[in-house]
Amino acid sequence: MYTYTEFDRAFVRQRAAQFRDQLERHLAGRLPDDDFRALRLQNGWYVQRHAPMLRVAVPYGELSSRQLKRLAHVARTYDRGYGHFTTRQNLQFNWIPLERAADVMDALAEVDMHGIQTSGNCIRNITSDALAGVAADELIDPRPYCEILRQWTTLQPEFAFLPRKFKIAVTGAREDRAAIAWHDIGLQLLRNGAGEVGFKVLVGGGMGRTPVIASVASEFVPWQQILLFIEAIVRVYNLYGRRDNLYKARIKILVKAEGARFFDAVQREFRAILEQDAGGAEHIIPQVEFDRVASSFATPAAFEAPSAAALRPAGDTPVVYTRWLARNVQAHRLPHLRTVTLSLKRAGQAPGDATAEQMDLAADLAERFSQGELRVTHDQNLLLPWVREEDLHALWQSAREAGFATPNIGLLTDMIACPGGDFCGLANARSIPIAAAIEERFRDLDLVHDIGDIDLHMSGCMNSCGHHHSGHIGILGVDKDGDEWYQVSLGGSDGSTLSGPSTPGKAIGPAFSADEVPDAVEAVIDAYLAQRRPGERFIDTVRRLGIPPFRAAADAARRSTAHEPALA
Amino acid sequence: MRFIDPSRDEWTSTADATVTPGRGPVLLSWEQWQSVRHDRPTESRLGVVVPNAVDVADLRADLSRLALVVLQFPKWTDGRAYSQARLLRARLRFGGEIRAAGQVLVDMLPLLQRSGFDAVQLRDDQSLDSAQRALRFFASHYQGDVLEPRPLFARQAA
């Protein structure tokens, strides 16, 4: 993990002090709601249904056991004992009174954590591959670049008040586990023909009301110049992005509207920074700085070589263990190591939720089995990146006791879901009861394993925090006359190899009522099971057959919505 | 950072953009500036109010004749003027005053200062004490800016 310097530590403390000053002025009535809003947002504080929500940054998903224990402490001391991991690798608390906000920021700063730019119309916390630095299919470790980007974006003064939020995702592997084409900027690390490292830069992806897949802004930007290229993109956006309509303010709309003119403007701006600006070239990253940051991410020495301990023969292993090995354990770039996903998708808890006790237990597992390091995954699970092969069985037993060993990673019940209307002030409908109903319907692990790989994503509103657009099955909460309804879509992709090129799913007819959703999902799954070819995955069957047979199956499951006039 | 007291500001606006020789500095609207920029005599010190939608590169040829550029915040969360100020300083090498006007809140001050503003006219209800305190929270920053073009890594290497 990146090791904080004295500068980094002082900076987070200074930010906490600045926020305390703002909060105190607000609580004293000297900073009105309207003015305080953008300030608290840029520190991660929303105002939600029940209380403020705090979104804590987990930069590019890397978390230490010490930090996770502090998050558990915050959950226990200031919240109601739990937190929620998000698709953007952050952690959210839902019940902290605003009066205690500054104390929480101080408590987080002590372990190098903060909420800087986790919300607001600024460059948000940068996300990456949860397997960054350990993936077997990785070409270039993205973490040093992520950290350099984190530092550059942190309180960048010119881009704090953009037309709308701005999200950057980075990957350095063959497989895209960071959904980069769905981001405002997606960065793919690669080597050019001469073997030099650089970035393919995508711009203008996004979900929301208008799902758009990002376009290529440059096939290759040398890594040394990436800050300047991003500066050029964000400056063009800051100056020309729409500010008159919230729903047309993301950079995707500017890119769509201007097309080639946008990309020409970015190239012109990039050259102007390099050739004309006073100090323009100062942000070219020197090798020595890259090396300094990269040294934080060196492989822990203890893991460089296989240990002397022999692998015990497995003997009679229960099927649930072999399933766990198949689903929750992934290959590592070092052949004697594995990465292990701790599933946060289990009966009785919302997807991505963890109690303070569970956070402590996960931190303990990380200390025992993974060098004290964890990752937060895009799919809202935790991951241990440094597990020895010979420790897998012991880890499984401990993970099982702690409730983290549901062998469902990548399966139907490993669904992505936002907190929805139970918590979120923006949501049109609740997500958690729908997720619970689907989990209950598909609790039979034999069935879930038979269904196989599938992405089910659920959002409580068009803001798409649950990434419904990119789900093989997407569920979107919509409001109609004050009631909760759910639009079901099929065939979306996050851009992974399994899912195919990034694309939004297609809605299968009018929205369903809440109680129809599990039936509709089951009907779609039954149609797949009935019509799949041997070995064919859900997404491939949907592509082969198209939407109509699945729509017909889902329509047959309608009850209250069966007699509504069909919408096109 | 200079805090402008509007009641004592030396800059005056004029309705018709005519110049009275010897008069104090004149602040022109963008429209006034467009109508007189080709023939305006140079004896008066001139300032111009630049709208957010203007590409400040259009001022390139005229900047030597301007002592003041006023950039605007129609809402305090509308951040276009930060980019305009940065371009005026770092790209166009404008050395005159860049003033923030409109919805200017004390909490914007660190951003304004780092983007190239050197004067602000705070919104009426803002406290000068809070503004001055807002400028003192951070000892230094990661990235370079108009005041210190070198990022942290370049400063540490020096």
Image (cartoon, rainbow, N blue to C red):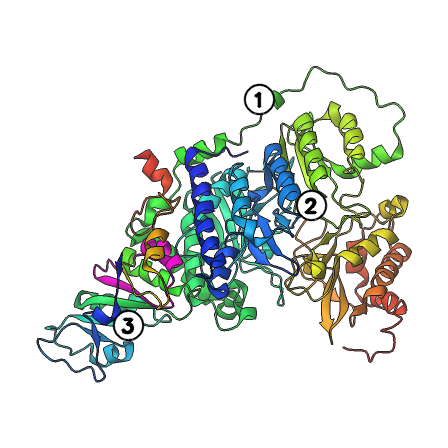
Q: Nearer the viewer, mark 2 or mark 1?
A: 2
In the rendered image, the quadrant that contains the N terminus of chain B is bottom left
**Three-letter amino acid code at the position of disc 1:** Ala
Q: Which residue is label 2 attached to?
A: A82
Q: Name the side, left or right, on which A204 lies relative to A536.
A: left
Question: Which residue corresponds to the image point at 58% horizontal and 25% vertical from the top-left?
Answer: A300
- Chain letter for mark 1, please: A
Mark 1 to mark 3 CA distance (whole Å): 61 Å
Q: Name the side, left or right, on which A230 lies relative to A487.
A: left
Q: Which residue is label 3 attached to?
A: B49
Q: Which residue is label 1 attached to?
A: A301
Quarter residue A284 falls in: top left
**Three-letter amino acid code at the position of disc 2:** Tyr
Mark 2 to mark 1 CA distance (whole Å): 34 Å
Residue B34 sits above or below residue A92 on the image? below
Question: Is residue B104 inside the magenta stretch?
Answer: yes
Residue A481 sits above or below residue A317 on the image? below
Can you give x and y, in whole percent of width and height, for residue A96 in the image? 61, 51
Question: Is residue A357 inside the magenta stretch?
Answer: no
Q: Which residues are magenta?
A: B92-116
Mark 2 to mark 3 CA distance (whole Å): 52 Å
Can you give x and y, in whole percent of width and height, for residue A100 in the image? 56, 49
Instruction: Confirm whether residue A335 shows in the render.
Output: no
